[in-house]
Image (cartoon, helix red, strand yellow):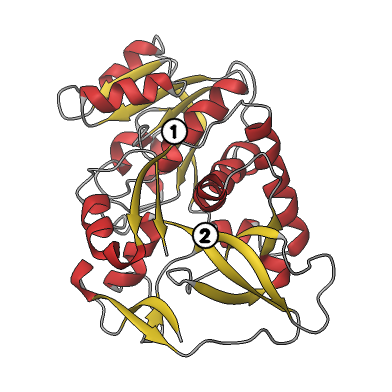
Amino acid sequence: MVAVVRVHQTGGPEMLRYEDIPAKEPGQGEIKIKQTAIGLNYIDTYFRSGLYPAQLPFVAGNEGAGVVTAVGPGVKGIKKGDRVAYVFTLGAYAAERVLPAERAVKIPPKIDDKTAAAMMLKGMTAQYLLRRTYKVKKGDTILVHAAAGGVGQILCQWGKALGATVIGTVGSKQKADIAKKNGAHHTILYNEENWVARVAEITHGKKCDVVYDGVGKTTFMGSLDCLRPLGMMVIYGNASGPVDSLNTGILAQKGSLFLTRPTLATYTASAKDLQATAKDLIDVILKKKVKIEVNQTYSLRDAQQAHRDLESRKTTGQTVLIP
């Protein structure tokens, strides 16, 4: 038997059940890992609430790290005893799990288990946003919403390293300090300031080349007003709820804007893209251009509380669950 956190019915954090289920062995092309740390992500709440549909019951969670304990037939390049991390839809909230070997990434010795578990989803999300969705270059101005959050902190650090001017929106002075510590050149308290007007002021009316918006519904229209003509609006999350139906004519009216709703799953669909994305992330971490701050640690059995704290915005940076 193996300890897991399962969802039998969608809803609030109370729907996360800590229980035992039968253990599995790896099949063709699969590996089994004993998990040492599990990443907590906002997408976990989308599956739990039912915003993202999944077949019930399911083991929650999308990323983790650990040690390979068994290797199935046909697996090449990974052996028993290797340290690996992964992002693979559902099944992460578990003491051990089986997953396709091609979705695992080997972790170098200089990256510890908590960092490995916390870096994959958010770090690789930042990688494709900055290096592929819109290729940030020196001299660009970027706007990062929730700049003190998990993805936000990485976007600020990496954006600064690429030579961009980074503007971050945050909900408190404490979070403003966190965003500045992580590379934001300017911070805006969205609860106290007209953040659209502040962006225009900071940029002397030129506005931004790209907006990275993981908030969604409440920031969407304002974000469009922060873009220069031909700027790109990137919605990569729905923390405040999904964006309602859009009259695409608004994009023309506001300067022939580009709009995209990318996902990590699409950008890392092939094993080649997954490994390339992970390699770029690992490189910037080892070069100390990006630091993964694990600021909260919970026991796996306390997953309900971890979700409550995440959704009430009590967490900053990265959070991990320990089996």
Q: Quadrant of the C terminus?
A: bottom left
- The disc label shown at residue 153, or none: 1
| Foreground of the two, 267 or 11 | 11
Left or right: residue 41 compared with residue 98: left
Residue 142 higher or lower than 251, as above or below:
above
Q: Residue furthest top?
A: 204
| Foreground of the two, 217 or 192 | 192
Sequence-wise, the earlier of marks 2 and 1 is: 2
Residue type (three-letter) at the residue carrying disc 1: Gln
Q: What residue is disc 2 on?
A: 36
Q: Quadrant of residue 189?
A: top left
Residue 309 higher or lower than 192, as above or below:
below
Whether residue 305 appears in this view of the structure is: yes
Q: Residue at x 57, y 29 (%)?
A: 158
> Where's residue 265, x and y in %?
58, 62
Disc 1 is placed on an element classified as: helix
Q: Residue at x 40, y 81 (%)?
A: 58
Residue type (three-letter) at the residue carrying disc 2: Thr
| Foreground of the two, 35 or 192 | 35
Neighbor class of circle 1 (other Cα within 10 Å; few <14, some 14-19, many 20+) is many
Residue 18 higher or lower than 301, as above or below:
below
